[in-house]
Amino acid sequence: MTENDYGIKHGIISELEQQLSMTLYKWLEKRALKLDENEDKKMIVDLLEGAEEVLNKWL
């Protein structure tokens, strides 16, 4: 693995961690309000879309 590969992988992982943390935090906040099942599904979709955005940016 080259130094450049390491930098790219580190950047992807760091940004994914940030994106996932923010989305999960929002989900947990809303979960405390006892959301229905459809809202839970929407938050999972938001989580995956955020991860997809990060991967598309880096790949």
Image (cartoon, grey):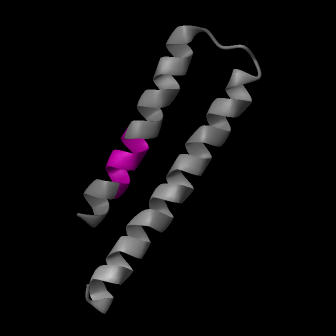
Q: Is residue 31 left or right of residue 8?
A: right
Residue 14, image x and y in percent?
A: 49, 66
Looking at the image, residue 1 lies above or below residue 15: below
Quarter of the image for residue 28 reads top right
Residue 36, image x and y in percent?
A: 61, 8
Outermost residue toward the bottom in this view: 3
Q: Residue at x 52, y 28 (%)?
A: 43
Looking at the image, residue 52 lies above or below residue 40: below
Looking at the image, residue 41 lies above or below residue 13: above
Assign the N terminus to one quadrant of the image.
Answer: bottom left
Q: Residue at x 39, y 66 (%)?
A: 12
Which is more toward the observer, 2 or 24?
Answer: 2
Assign the C terminus to one quadrant of the image.
Answer: bottom left
Outermost residue toward the front in this view: 1
The question of residue 51 being in magenta is answered with yes
Q: Is residue 32 left or right of residue 12?
A: right
Outermost residue toward the left in this view: 59
Looking at the image, residue 39 lies above or below residue 4: above
Q: Main SS of the magenta segment?
A: helix
Residue 6, image x and y in percent?
A: 35, 81
Q: Is residue 35 left or right of residue 17?
A: right
The question of residue 8 being in magenta is answered with no
Q: Is residue 45 left or right of residue 33?
A: left
Q: Residue at x 40, y 38 (%)?
A: 48
Q: How many marks?
A: 0
Q: Which residues are magenta?
A: 49-54
Residue 19, image x and y in percent?
A: 51, 52
